[in-house]
C-alpha cells in the first residue's frame, strides 16, 4: 500500500494522494536521447497544438539549438551538445571552447543571465559587439592540422520537457491552486486561476516553468492534458519520427527505460544513464524519464535536483525559532522597560 | 565527479577557494543557467523590508499600548499600517495578473510559504488597520461612544495582530528559502534569524525616529536586540556558505550587504550610545537601522537572483552531493 | 553517402533508426558531420565531389579480394558479356574513353558496344525508362568463366585497379584505416545471408558526374548481390515529398508519362518514334513500349486518335535539343523566351546562380507564379540584391508578374509518390482560403479558356489543343469547375475502351487503340474501379510487406527486380533473405511480394529463337526492363559520359586529378557567359584565389528555398539566420569568430553569413595538402520573417551531360571575415577577385586536359 510522502520520497500513487480515488494510471514520457536525431519536430508539434507563441528569432550559436531552454514559450527544447576529445581517449568529452567562449558572455550579459531563453529572446547584440571579442587566442593539443591532431567528436541531442515530478516544486509552492495534479499524475497550470505570482518559477529545480511576458501567467508543458482526455498521446510524442519520445504508462516506461539502459550498457555505452528514474531521488522520480549519454549538467539539467518541500520541516522549525526569538525580543524590550520605568 | 571529466570548458572565472570545491570548471550547457531567474522584481525585495517593518512596528505599538507610551504607540501603529499598505501594493503590483490578487485566498496551502504568508498577513492586517484607524480619530471625538467602542475593539485587534507579527517578520525567510534558488535555499537555517533581526531593527529604528526619546526606550532595546541578532546571524550565515558565498560577496548584492552591515553596526552603536540622550542622535540611528534593514533585504534578494544566473551554483553542490553519496556507497561495498 | 537523411528526410530516417536498434550497422560518408553522422556507427569525412573515387576503391577492394557474390554476378549481371575490341578505357587514354570527339565534347559510343550486338542510340532521354535499345541480344558474346580479357568483369577490374586505399586517401582525404573499415563493414554485411542498403540523395546527383555517382553505387551493390533482395537496394531519397511522382508523370521537357521519351524533331511518324524507343528484337517489357505509348495517345486525344492518324502522334510537340530549366533561363536573358510559368519552385532563391536567374526574370514580358506565399520569384523586381547594385531597377523592370495563390497539399486531394514508388492517396483536410485554388482547378480552367480561344483557329499548331480529349469528371461548374482527382487517377490507371472498365495492369494495354492509359506504370492503381492508393490497412493486420497499404508501381510490387532474391534455380539465396521463389508444384513464382518476373516462366527457361519482349526473357534474366535482361556493371550505351564511372574532379576544384590527366568530366555541359563565370581549377593557374571547397545543403528546420518555412514563426525561430560552418582551423586561418560575420566569395557573388566554428567541419589532409571545406544552408532570401543572402548566388551553372542537373554540391570559394560590401563596392570586390584569378569567359570551359601535365606528387 502507498506510503504517503507528501513532501518528498517515493510515492506509488501520486494521483490518489491528490484526491482522485478512481483514476487512470500515471502516464509520462520516456525520452531516449540515444535515438534523437535533433529534428525538433517535437518543438513544432507542441507549439502548433498548444498555441504556444514564438519565443524569438534569435541565432544563439549553441550548436543547432536556437531555442536555448525550456520556458513559458517553449515546452519542448532540443539540446545539441557538440563534444570533442583527443583521439582514442576514454571519456573526457568537452564542449568546444570556440562556441562557449562566444555564447556564454552573451548569456551572462542578458537581464536574466540567459534563463529568459525559451520565454523571450536575448537582447540583440550591438553591431560588431560579438566580433570585437576577437579570434580565440588559446590553443589546445590537437589544434594543428597534422594527422596526430585528430580528435574524436560526437554530437548529443536531447529533447527536454517538464519532468512532471512526483513531488513538483512548482505545484507545492503555488499559492492559488492554479497548479494541480491531474488524474493522470501530471502537473498542469490552470490558466483561469493563475495570477502570475511567479513563485512556481523559483520553486522548480529544473528551470522549466516561467511567466509569459505580456500575459503574466505561468506556462509549461501540460503533457497535452486535453489530448489525454481524448485518448490521444501528446503532440510531441506523436510527431517524434524515431520514437526518441515515448509516451505511455509510467510503470511500463520505467521498465522500457531499464531495458534500453541494459541494452546500451551491453553495447559498451558505459556513460548511458537514466535521469529521473529513481523514486528515491530528490523529487520522488520524474513523470518524464530520460536516457542520457552524458552527465545531466552537460545537457543543462541539474544533476541532483531536490524539491523545496524536502526542506520545509527544517525551514519552518527555523522560522518558528526565529519568530519566537523575535517575540521574546519584543516582550523583553518592554518588560525591561517596565522594570526600568519602575527603577 | 569522475576523474576523467575534462575541465576545458565553461566559465573561466576563478572559483573562490571554498573548502571542498573542485578546482577548475564545471560541465554546463554552453554556460547557460540551469534554473530560471526569479521573475520577482525589486518590489518583492522592497516588500521584504516593508513587511518586516510592519511587523516590528506592530510589536512596539502593542507594547507601547500595554505600557502606556501613547506617542510611541501612535507612531508605530501608523507606521505599521503605512508599511503594511506599502507591502500590499508592492505584492499586488508584482503579480503577473494583479487583478487576480484575490486568487491567493482560494486555498490555504501549508506547502506554499506564500499561501501561509497570505493567511498570516490576513490575520495581521485587520488589527493593524483597526488600531491605526483609532489613532487617526481626532482627539475631540475620542470620548464619544462609537469612538470608545472602536477603541475597545481596535485595541484587542491590535494586540492580536501583534501576536501574529513574529510570523509576518519571519515567514519571508521561508518564502525565499523554500525555492530551488541556491542563494536562498542554502541559507535556510540562518535566514529566518537574519530576517527576524532585520525586522526588529527596522521596527525599533522606526520607533526611535518617530517617537520622543523619553518614550522610545523599548524601541531602542528592541532595535539593539534586533540589530545584534541580525549581525550575528548574518555573519554566521556567511561562514556556513559554500560556493554561493560568491554571490553574497560580489556585485550589487555584495555592496548592499556590506552597506547593510555598516549601517546596522552604526545604527546599533548610535542606539546604545546616543539615541537615549539626543533626539537627533535617535533619529539618525533609527534611519541607519532602517537603511541597514532595507539593504539587507535587497542584498539577500539579489544574491539569490544572481545565484540562478550561473549554472555552477546549481551544479557544483549537487554534483558534490552525488559524488559523496557514490563514495559512501563504494566505501560500503568495499 | 551524399545524403543527410536524418536532417533532410527525418521521417524516413525512423526506419534507419529501427534497423539500427535491430542490429544494423550504419555508416555515413559525407563532407560534413551532420545529424545523420551523429546517429551513425561510423562517420567518414570525404572531400565533396570525390564519391566515385571512394566507391571505385570499394569496387577495387571487392574485386582484388574476390569478395563479390560470384554466383549472382555471373548470372544476373552483364559481367560475362564481351565488349567490342575497339573499346579503350580511361586507363589507356589518360581519363578518356574511346570515341571522344573534342569538337562536340561528346562520345561516339560505337566502340562501347557488346561484341555481337549493337546499340547505337545515345542518351538516356532518347529511349526512356528501358534504357538503350539493343538489337540482337541473342548474339552477344559471353564468357561465363569471367576470364576473357574483354569481358565486362575483367574490364571493370582493370578500370578500378588503381583505386587503392592510398589513392582514396589522396583523392578523398579519407585515411586508409577508416576506408578499410567501411569496406569490411560493407562486404561482411553482403552476400548470401546478409544484405546492405545504400542510401543517396542530392549530394550525389547535383554533380557534373551525378549519374555516374549512382552508377558507381549500383556497381558496388550488384557486385555484392544487394539488388532485388530484401534489405538491399539503392535508395534515391528525393528532394521533395512528391519528386518521384513528378518524374513518373513528369514535369521534365524530355519525358512523357511513364518514362517514354519526348518525340524529337525529325521523327516523321509513330513507327519512326517507336523504332528509336525500342528494338523489336530486344528482351523484356520495354519491348512493349508501343502499347504504353499508343494508350497514352488515346488518353490524350480520345476518339480523335485512330490508327489512321498514328493516334495523333503528329499533334505532339517535338524537342530539338536542350530545353531544360537552365537553358531556358539563359534564353530569357538572350531575349529568346518571353513568358514563364513558375509553380512550386522559387528559382530566384533555389536555383544555381541566383543572379542569373533574377536577371532572366527581369527580361520577360510576363511571368506567372503560383505558390503558397509571395516568394522572391514573384517579388524579385522589388527586392532582388541586384537593385542595390543597380542591375535591376524596379521602376524600369518591364516584367509583368501574375501571382496566383495556390492551395496547399492539405487543401486538396491527390497523391504523393515516395521514393519506394509507393503512391499514397491523401484526402482534403481543409478548404482553401480566399483565392487559393488547386493545381487541377488551375490547369482545367487554363485549358478551358485557351481552348475557347482557339476553337475556331485554323492554325495547325492549335490542332493538338482542339483535339485534346479533356473530359475529366468535374465538380462544380463554370469558373468553379475542377476535375475530380479520383477520376484523374482512374484515367492514369487506364481504361479498356471496349468495356469502359479500368484495366488491371500494364500488360492489359494494347497498341491497337483499344486501351487508353495516362501512365502505363501506374496501371493497376485503380484496379477493379477502386482507388488502391487510398488503402490504409494497418500493419498489424497484414503481412511483412504490407501490400494493402497504398499502392506501389509497378503492379503493387514492393521490391523491383525481386527475381534476383532467388538463386538460379528459383530458390531463395537464403531463408533469412527470402522474398519470392519458384513454386515447382504450382509452376509459378510466388512469395511475400508480387514477383517481378513473368509469373509462369520457370527458372531454367531458355526462350526459343526469335522470341522477343517478355517471352524472350530467360529464366535467369531478373532485370526485365533491360534490353538484355541483365543488370549493367558496364553500360554499353545510354550514359553519355562513359560506360563506367570514373573519378573526375568537380568542375571547380582546388585539386589536380591525381588519377588522370583528364581533370573533370570531359562531357560536362559548360555555359560560358558573362553572368556565369567559373573559378579556375587545375591545371589552370591562380587556383589559390578560391582555395576552399564550398558545399551547400539543407537544414531540417527549413524547406528548400524557404517558401514554406521562412514565413512561419515556428520554423523560422528554429533557424533564424544564415550561417556558414567552418572548422576551428579554418577560423584561425581566416580570423573568423563563432557568431561573428564572414562573407563567402566566388567569382559570381559574395554572401554574408554568421560564422559557426564547429568540429562538425574539419580540414582534410590529402596528397600532402590541407584542404578546407565550408558549408552553408541555402534557405534564406530577401523576404520573410527571417532573411539572408541567397547562397545559390555563389554557384555557377555547369551540368551533368545525362540529365542536365547542375553541380551545386561543390564549387570553390574563399571566406573573408566581416560583412560583405554593398552596392558598387560589392561589384568592385567581385571584379577585383575575378581579375586576381585571371578569370575570362574561357576559364573552366576547356573540357579536355589530358596530357597537360602529370598529376602532382605529394611531398
Image: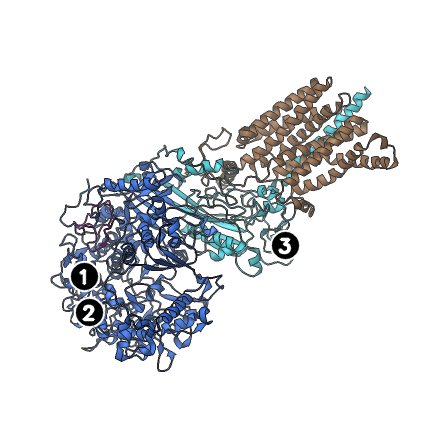
Chain colours: A cyan, B brown, C blue
Q: Residue A304 in the image: x percent, y percent?
A: 52, 42
Q: Secondary structure at mark 2?
A: loop
Q: Chain of mark 1?
A: C
Q: Which mark is residue C153?
A: 1
In three-dimensional space, the C-alpha distance between marks 1 and 2, rounded to whole angstroms, equals 20 Å
- Of C214 and A3, nearer the camera is C214
Q: Position of residue A69 (x, y in %)?
A: 49, 44
Instruction: Say what secondary structure mark 3 lies in.
Output: helix
A196 or C407: nearer the viewer: C407
Disc 2: which chain?
C
Please tell me whether mark 1 or mark 3 is closer to you in this view: 1
Q: CA distance from mark 2 to mark 3?
A: 78 Å
**Is C106 within the magenta?**
no
Query: Which contiguous range is marked in magenta?
Result: C648-673
* Circle 1: element type: helix
Vertical side of B176 occupied by C628: above or below: below
Q: Is residue C225 above or below residue C823?
A: below
The label number, if any, that marks residue C134 in the structure image? 2
Q: Say left or right for A180 vs A262.
A: right
Where does residue A125 sit, x and y in percent of width and height?
45, 38
Tell me which chain the residue with mark 3 is part of.
A
Tell me which label, 1 or 2, sits earlier in the chain: 2
Determine which residue is flagged by label 3. A16
Amino acid at each position: 500500500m502507498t506510503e504517503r510522502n507528501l513532501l518528498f520520497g517515493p510515492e506509488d500513487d501520486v494521483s490518489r494522494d491528490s484526491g482522485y480515488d478512481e483514476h487512470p494510471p500515471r502516464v509520462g514520457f520516456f525520452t531516449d536521447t540515444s535515438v534523437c536525431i535533433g529534428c525538433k519536430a517535437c518543438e513544432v508539434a507542441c507549439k502548433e497544438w498548444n498555441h504556444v507563441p514564438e519565443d524569438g528569432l534569435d541565432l544563439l550559436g549553441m550548436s543547432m539549438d536556437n531555442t536555448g531552454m525550456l520556458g513559458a514559450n517553449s515546452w519542448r527544447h532540443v539540446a545539441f551538445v557538440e563534444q570533442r576529445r583527443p583521439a582514442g581517449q576514454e571519456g573526457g568529452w568537452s564542449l568546444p571552447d570556440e562556441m562557449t567562449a562566444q555564447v556564454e558572455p552573451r548569456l551572462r550579459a542578458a537581464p536574466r543571465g540567459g534563463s529568459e531563453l525559451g520565454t523571450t529572446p536575448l537582447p540583440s547584440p550591438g553591431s560588431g559587439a560579438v566580433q570585437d571579442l576577437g579570434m580565440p587566442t588559446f590553443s589546445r593539443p590537437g589544434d594543428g592540422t597534422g594527422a596526430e591532431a585528430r580528435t574524436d567528436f560526437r554530437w548529443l541531442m536531447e529533447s527536454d520537457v517538464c519532468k512532471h515530478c512526483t513531488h513538483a516544486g512548482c505545484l507545492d509552492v503555488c499559492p492559488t491552486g492554479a497548479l494541480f495534479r491531474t488524474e493522470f499524475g501530471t502537473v498542469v497550470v490552470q490558466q483561469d486561476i493563475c495570477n502570475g505570482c511567479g513563485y512556481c518559477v523559483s520553486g522548480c529545480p529544473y528551470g522549466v516553468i516561467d511567466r509569459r511576458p505580456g500575459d503574466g501567467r505561468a506556462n509549461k508543458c501540460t503533457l497535452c492534458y486535453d489530448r489525454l482526455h481524448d485518448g490521444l498521446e501528446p503532440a510531441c510524442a506523436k510527431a517524434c519520427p524515431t520514437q526518441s519520445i515515448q509516451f505511455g504508462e509510467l510503470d511500463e516506461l520505467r521498465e522500457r527505460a531499464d531495458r534500453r539502459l541494459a541494452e546500451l550498457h551491453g553495447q559498451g555505452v558505459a556513460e548511458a544513464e537514466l535521469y529521473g528514474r529513481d523514486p528515491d531521488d530528490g523529487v520522488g522520480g520524474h513523470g518524464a524519464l530520460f536516457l542520457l549519454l552524458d552527465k545531466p549538467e552537460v545537457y543543462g539539467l541539474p544533476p541532483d535536483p531536490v524539491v523545496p518541500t524536502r526542506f520545509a520541516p527544517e525551514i519552518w522549525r527555523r522560522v518558528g525559532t526565529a519568530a519566537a526569538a523575535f517575540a521574546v525580543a519584543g516582550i523583553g524590550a518592554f518588560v525591561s522597560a517596565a522594570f526600568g520605568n519602575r527603577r | 565527479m569522475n576523474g576523467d571529466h575534462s575541465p576545458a570548458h565553461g566559465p573561466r572565472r576563478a572559483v573562490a577557494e571554498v573548502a571542498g570545491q573542485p578546482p577548475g570548471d564545471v560541465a554546463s550547457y554552453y554556460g547557460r543557467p540551469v534554473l530560471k531567474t526569479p521573475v520577482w522584481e525589486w518590489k518583492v525585495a522592497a516588500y521584504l523590508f516593508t513587511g518586516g517593518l510592519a511587523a516590528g512596528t506592530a510589536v512596539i505599538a502593542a507594547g507601547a499600548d500595554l505600557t502606556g507610551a501613547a506617542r510611541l504607540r501612535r507612531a508605530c501603529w501608523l507606521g505599521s499600517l503605512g508599511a503594511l499598505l506599502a507591502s500590499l501594493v508592492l505584492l499586488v503590483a508584482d503579480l503577473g495578473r494583479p487583478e487576480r490578487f484575490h486568487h491567493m485566498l482560494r486555498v490555504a496551502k501549508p506547502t506554499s510559504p506564500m499561501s501561509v504568508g497570505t493567511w498570516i498577513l490576513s490575520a495581521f492586517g485587520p488589527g493593524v488597520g483597526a488600531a491605526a484607524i483609532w489613532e487617526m480619530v481626532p482627539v475631540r471625538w475620542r470620548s464619544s461612544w462609537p469612538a470608545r467602542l472602536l477603541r475597545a475593539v481596535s485595541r484587542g485587534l491590535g494586540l492580536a495582530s501583534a501576536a501574529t507579527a513574529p510570523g509576518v517578520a519571519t515567514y519571508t525567510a521561508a518564502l525565499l528559502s523554500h525555492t530551488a534558488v541556491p542563494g536562498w535555499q542554502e541559507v535556510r537555517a540562518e535566514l529566518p534569524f537574519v530576517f527576524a533581526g532585520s525586522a526588529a531593527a527596522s521596527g525599533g529604528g522606526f520607533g526611535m525616529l518617530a517617537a520622543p526619546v523619553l518614550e522610545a526606550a523599548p524601541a531602542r532595546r528592541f532595535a539593539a536586540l534586533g540589530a545584534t541578532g541580525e549581525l550575528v546571524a548574518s555573519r554566521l550565515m556567511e561562514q556556513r556558505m559554500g560556493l554561493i558565498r560568491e554571490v553574497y560577496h560580489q556585485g550589487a548584492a555584495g555592496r548592499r550587504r556590506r552597506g547593510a552591515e555598516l549601517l546596522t553596526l552604526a545604527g546599533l552603536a548610535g542606539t546604545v550610545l546616543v539615541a537615549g540622550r539626543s533626539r537627533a542622535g535617535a533619529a539618525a540611528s533609527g534611519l541607519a537601522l532602517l537603511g541597514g534593514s532595507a539593504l539587507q533585504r535587497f542584498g539577500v534578494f539579489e544574491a539569490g537572483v544572481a545565484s540562478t544566473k550561473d549554472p555552477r551554483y546549481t551544479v557544483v553542490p549537487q554534483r558534490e552531493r552525488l559524488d559523496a553519496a557514490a563514495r559512501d556507497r563504494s566505501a560500503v561495498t568495499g | 553517402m551524399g545524403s543527410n537523411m536524418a536532417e533532410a528526410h527525418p521521417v524516413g530516417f525512423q526506419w534507419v533508426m529501427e534497423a539500427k536498434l535491430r542490429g544494423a550497422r550504419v555508416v555515413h560518408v559525407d563532407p560534413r558531420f551532420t545529424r545523420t553522422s551523429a546517429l551513425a556507427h561510423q562517420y567518414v569525412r570525404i572531400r565533396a565531389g570525390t564519391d566515385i573515387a571512394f566507391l571505385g576503391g570499394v569496387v577495387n577492394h571487392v574485386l582484388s579480394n574476390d569478395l563479390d557474390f560470384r554466383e549472382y554476378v555471373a548470372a544476373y549481371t552483364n559481367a560475362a558479356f564481351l565488349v567490342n575490341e575497339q573499346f579503350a578505357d580511361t586507363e589507356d587514354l589518360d581519363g578518356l574513353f574511346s570515341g571522344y570527339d573534342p569538337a562536340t565534347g561528346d562520345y561516339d559510343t560505337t566502340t562501347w558496344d557488346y561484341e555481337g550486338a549493337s546499340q547505337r542510340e545515345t542518351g538516356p532521354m532518347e529511349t526512356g525508362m528501358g534504357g538503350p535499345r539493343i538489337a540482337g541480344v541473342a548474339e552477344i558474346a559471353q564468357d561465363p568463366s569471367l576470364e576473357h580479357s574483354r569481358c565486362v568483369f575483367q574490364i571493370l577490374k582493370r578500370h578500378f585497379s588503381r583505386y587503392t586505399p592510398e589513392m582514396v586517401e589522396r583523392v578523398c582525404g579519407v585515411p586508409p584505416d577508416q576506408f578499410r573499415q567501411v569496406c569490411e563493414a560493407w562486404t561482411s554485411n553482403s552476400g548470401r545471408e546478409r544484405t546492405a542498403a545504400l542510401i543517396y540523395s542530392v549530394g550525389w546527383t547535383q554533380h557534373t558526374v551525378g549519374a555516374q555517382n549512382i552508377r558507381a553505387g549500383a556497381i558496388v551493390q550488384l557486385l555484392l548481390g544487394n539488388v532485388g533482395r530484401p534489405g538491399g537496394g539503392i535508395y534515391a531519397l528525393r528532394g521533395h515529398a512528391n519528386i518521384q511522382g513528378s518524374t513518373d508523370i513528369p514535369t521534365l521537357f524530355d519525358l512523357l508519362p511513364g518514362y517514354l521519351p519526348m518525340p524529337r524533331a525529325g521523327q516523321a511518324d509513330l513507327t519512326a518514334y517507336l523504332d528509336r524507343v525500342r528494338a523489336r528484337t530486344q528482351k523484356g517489357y520495354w519491348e512493349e513500349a508501343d502499347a504504353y505509348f499508343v494508350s497514352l495517345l488515346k488518353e490524350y486525344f480520345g476518339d480523335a486518335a485512330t490508327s489512321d492518324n498514328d493516334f495523333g502522334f503528329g499533334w505532339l510537340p517535338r524537342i530539338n535539343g536542350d530545353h531544360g530549366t537552365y537553358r531556358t533561363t539563359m534564353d530569357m536573358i538572350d531575349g529568346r523566351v518571353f513568358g514563364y510559368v513558375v509553380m512550386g519552385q522559387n528559382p530566384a532563391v533555389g536555383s544555381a546562380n541566383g543572379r542569373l536567374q533574377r536577371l532572366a526574370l527581369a527580361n520577360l514580358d510576363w511571368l506567372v507564379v503560383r505558390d503558397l506565399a509571395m516568394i522572391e520569384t514573384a517579388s524579385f523586381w522589388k527586392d532582388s540584391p541586384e537593385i542595390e547594385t543597380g542591375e535591376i531597377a524596379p521602376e524600369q523592370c518591364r516584367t509583368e508578374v501574375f501571382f496566383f495563390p495556390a492551395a496547399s497539399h492539405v487543401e486538396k486531394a491527390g497523391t504523393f509518390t515516395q521514393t519506394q514508388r509507393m503512391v499514397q492517396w491523401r484526402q482534403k483536410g481543409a478548404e482553401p482560403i480566399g483565392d487559393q485554388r488547386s493545381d487541377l482547378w488551375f490547369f482545367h480552367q487554363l485549358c478551358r479558356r485557351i481552348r475557347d480561344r482557339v476553337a475556331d483557329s485554323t492554325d495547325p499548331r492549335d490542332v493538338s489543343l482542339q483535339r485534346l480529349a479533356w473530359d475529366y469528371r468535374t465538380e462544380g461548374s463554370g469558373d468553379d469547375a475542377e476535375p475530380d482527382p479520383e477520376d484523374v487517377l482512374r484515367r492514369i490507371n487506364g481504361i479498356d475502351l471496349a468495356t469502359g472498365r479500368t484495366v488491371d495492369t500494364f500488360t492489359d494495354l494494347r497498341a491497337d487503340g483499344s486501351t487508353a492509359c495516362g501512365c502505363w506504370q501506374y496501371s493497376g492503381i485503380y484496379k477493379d474501379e477502386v482507388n488502391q492508393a487510398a488503402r490504409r490497412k494497418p500493419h498489424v493486420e497484414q503481412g511483412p510487406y504490407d501490400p494493402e497499404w497504398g499502392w506501389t508501381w509497378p503492379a503493387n510490387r514492393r521490391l523491383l527486380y525481386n527475381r534476383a532474391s532467388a538463386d538460379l534455380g528459383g530458390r531463395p539465396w537464403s531463408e533469412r533473405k527470402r522474398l519470392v521463389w519458384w513454386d515447382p508444384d504450382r509452376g509459378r513464382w510466388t512469395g511475400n511480394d508480387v514477383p517481378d518476373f513473368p509469373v509462369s516462366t520457370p527458372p531454367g527457361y531458355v526462350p526459343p529463337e526469335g522470341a522477343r519482349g517478355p517471352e524472350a526473357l530467360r529464366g535467369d534474366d531478373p532485370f526485365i526492363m533491360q534490353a538484355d535482361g541483365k543488370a549493367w556493371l558496364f553500360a554499353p550505351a545510354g550514359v553519355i559520359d562513359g560506360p563506367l564511372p570514373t573519378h573526375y574532379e568537380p568542375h571547380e576544384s582546388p585539386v589536380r586529378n591525381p588519377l588522370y590527366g583528364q581533370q573533370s568530366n570531359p562531357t560536362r555541359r559548360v555555359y560560358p557567359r558573362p553572368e556565369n563565370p567559373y573559378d579556375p581549377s587545375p591545371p589552370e593557374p591562380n587556383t589559390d584565389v578560391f582555395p576552399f571547397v564550398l558545399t551547400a545543403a539543407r537544414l531540417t528546420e527549413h524547406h528548400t528555398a524557404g517558401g514554406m518555412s521562412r514565413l512561419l514563426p515556428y520554423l523560422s525561430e528554429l533557424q533564424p539566420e544564415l550561417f556558414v560552418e567552418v572548422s576551428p582551423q579554418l577560423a584561425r586561418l581566416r580570423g573568423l569568430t563563432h557568431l561573428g560575420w564572414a562573407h563567402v566569395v566566388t567569382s559570381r557573388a559574395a554572401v554574408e553569413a554568421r560564422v559557426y566554428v564547429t568540429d562538425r567541419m574539419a580540414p582534410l589532409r590529402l596528397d600532402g595538402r590541407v584542404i578546407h571545406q565550408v558549408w552553408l544552408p541555402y534557405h534564406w532570401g530577401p523576404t520573410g520573417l527571417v532573411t539572408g543572402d541567397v547562397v545559390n548566388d555563389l554557384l555557377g551553372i555547369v551540368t551533368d551531360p545525362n540529365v542536365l542537373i547542375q553541380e551545386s554540391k561543390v564549387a570553390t570559394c574563399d571566406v573573408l571575415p566581416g560583412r560583405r560590401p554593398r552596392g558598387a563596392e560589392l561589384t568592385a570586390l567581385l571584379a577585383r577577385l575575378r581579375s586576381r584569378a585571371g578569370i575570362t569567359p574561357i576559364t573552366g570551359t576547356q573540357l579536355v586536359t589530358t596530357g597537360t601535365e602529370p598529376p602532382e606528387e605529394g611531398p
